[in-house]
Amino acid sequence: MGALGGAAASGVGFDALAAAAKAKPAAAAKSMEVKTFKSGCSICPNFCGIQGNVVNGIVKSIYPDAARAEVYNHGICPKGAAGMYNTYDPYRLKKPLKRTNPKKGPNENPGFVEISWEEAFSLVAERLRKIKADNPSKLVFQWGQGKYLIGDTNLKAWCGAFGTPNGVHRTTLCEAARHVADELTWGYHGHLPDLKYTNLLLNFGANYHEGEQTSRWLDWATAQGRERGLKTVVIDPRLSGCAAKADEWVPMRPGKDVVMVLAMCKLLIDAGTIDEEFLTTCTNSPQLVGADGKIVMDKDGKTPLVWDTVTNAAAAYTINVKPALKGSYTVDGKSVRTAFTVFAESLKDTTPQYAEEVTGVPAATIARLAATFAKEAHIGEFKEIDGVKLRYRPVAAYTFRGLAAKEFGVQNSRSLLILNSLVGAIDGVGGLLLHHPNNHPEYLEPAKCDYPPKRTDMQQTVFHPNSHHNIGQQTNITLLDPKSWGLGYVPEMQIFYGTNRAVSTSNAWQQFEGMAKTFNVVIDIVMGETAWYGDIVLPDKTYLESWHNAPAKTSPELGGIVAAIRQPMTNPFNLEQDANSIIFELAKRVGMRDKYIENLNKGWKLKEVTFKPGRDYTTEEQVATIWTDKTKKDFSYAKQHGFVAKGKLDAKGKYLHGVDPVFKGPGKPKFKLYADHFVGTYEKVEQVTKANNITRIDLPKYKIAYAPLPGKEHAFPTPHREAKDFPFYLITHKLMHRYQSGNTVNNAITNQALGSGLDTNYVAINTQTAKQMGINNGDTVQIETRVGKVKGVARLTQGVRPDTLAVSYHYGQWSPGYAPVAKQGTWINQVLELHPDVPSGMNSFNDTKCKLTKA
């Protein structure tokens, strides 16, 4: 209508408007200072490039940095666009706090009093000096999102200078089992579908349209792919954001993915629709397996044997040998089979009909998807790009937390890698692209199985032999009885940075019991539940207030990021310190500044521009030093542009850096379809367990977890086997607008302005199931598990299986330090059972069974 039309319509006449126009202004208009800042978002691990628009020192808006569109993100999510409201949150921590009540509990008033930074540093440094002199291992430093703020290179450097092995990140609360499955199969981690060319994407529980790593590239690339004909099928018990936008939603029973995947593998093998050339030359499928489950070795004890079809004898895979993919043979009077044959025969009973019984997915659907996957794989075909002839396999079976957040997360995730390998989609055009195969050859060998443990989180010990990414939930469990875990000391102090660790894991109240036993220093922006258990609480700056060396992502089309920064745009509360300056000051006061500086140089691999001993560095100086060494550009360029990216990859760089040069052909390591090193790892576990009389290890369970091949037994986690009286499967998920337990819960925009009902979560119940139970939309219901009970509000939907309940994370906060809106909803983690994946230590978020009643 316009300004005049609107005024007239509301009863304001033109005469009045004319008079107002002639009137003198009451005061001169305030001049506006407008600035823009190129930076990076840190609310989630997508690290999107952003541009902040600042007017008179106030961040007015946040948009995607247009320059990042060619690198990674074309847009940003609601959390990123509303990120300034985390900074201007009136519930922010603004002064250091000291606890006066020694008792710790959810109903205990900490009696916090404000103290000066000098007193805070003095108290913390004094305690640190005593621990360092006694036993540095008695300090635990835990971080979560803190890794993505100042970088865990700094945090690891600090822990190394102090002498504690106990630096603990949060990956087991996210996707660790997927990473470890990658590492134990092809020697490193990180894979993405080649969506530029993918024609069929089978998505097993990945949810990048709501909240996940690499979301802001995956969602855009999927949308672009649909324009040229990409079809997506989502296999998920819940109608997720990805499922809602898919061509087909397959609502599978929770936790049963591995059976469906293996049934598809069986169908491909039985039909002969597999890439035999890829399996023979790039994987260990032709290697001979003995009755003991181990690969048969040559006389040197190191070289695997295959069956040579030329000489009709066992031989090492050399240039003139043509290995048999299939078959049973006799070597030195003993029966052997190729690894592929062992796998194929293990699938004898995993028929589509059996899979239907276990998964709830019709056998006909499984058969159709398998046939379509094989057809769309174009096995045997090639595509020329940039003059290079490349394997063309435009299909990918993809997952993230969907297969990982389970008691048998590694085995579930490995099954999907095997499915991709059967059609040769690994590093094929349109297939599944790997990130630096065999970058860690030790991952393809039996694990060490250390005991007694040195670390509180049991990383890479006999308890979790392949936990290469720390075990986020374990430290506070260990604290309940360190001796029973074989730990030779009792931790006395914990530092928590950028993490609400206890709230974020299964069986959460157990975490708080452990935290109550230590002196806790918490560095955070709000008074979360972890801070409520703090003895000293130190306010941090947000990513809009401080300098950071920023992690950044790129699409598979680029070679990566050289360096990226975040820079301060505002400081509304005049905060004095950030996490970087805090740990630097503590290093100085503890007497380890120069060692910390030395470790920073090593950790960041600085060569020309380095940190110098004997002097202090501000946070900006630290960021500038690292930037200048990495990019060879002046820091003014960082302030203006925010990042430097590597160039676009050509066809060789994109497709011929991985499987083909690393694994293909004779005399090379292999993609482990058959995980023979699992057999060696289990033998070590058994030996160490018996030698030390370790009662915490259930050897039969470990043997299942370390089977060399995924099997149907991996679809039956502990609650599914034992909780017979609990009829419902309980699953959890993330939401686009709310992420991290503490990071965004106070945000007024994402909680309320985006729409009604976003300030709380619900218990998603199948409509027909609810009607049968007399439950209506909006009723209060109670979920009961073997761990505890929790109430929530029913949300009836056809978008969840009849035997499944779904509840999102990041609601129901209870700390008195939050805004009231943050405390609404259901904190579901408190009733989830915890049965960590044995190899990786991954948290089992999606295995719990429950009862449902109307409250």
Image (tube, rainbow, N blue to C red):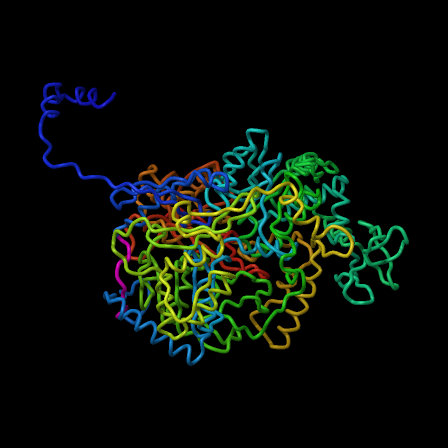
Tell me where residue 780 sits by quadrant.
top left
Q: Residue at x 44, y 42 (%)?
A: 764
Q: Quadrant of residue 703?
A: bottom right
Name the foreground residue: 265 vs 740: 740
Residue 732, position as x, y percentages in the image: 47, 48
x and y percentages locating residue 393 in the rendered image: 68, 38
**Towards the viewer: 686 or 818:** 818
Residue 54, magenta (yes or no): no
Reply yes or no: does residue 99 show up in magenta: yes
Horizontal and vertical percent for residue 263?
68, 44
Between 47 and 831, the residue placed more toward the observer is 47
* Image-quadrant location for residue 161: bottom left
The answer to whether 400 appears left or right of 22 in the picture is right
Main SS category, magenta section: loop
- Stretch in magenta: 91-100
Q: Quadrant of the N terminus?
A: top left
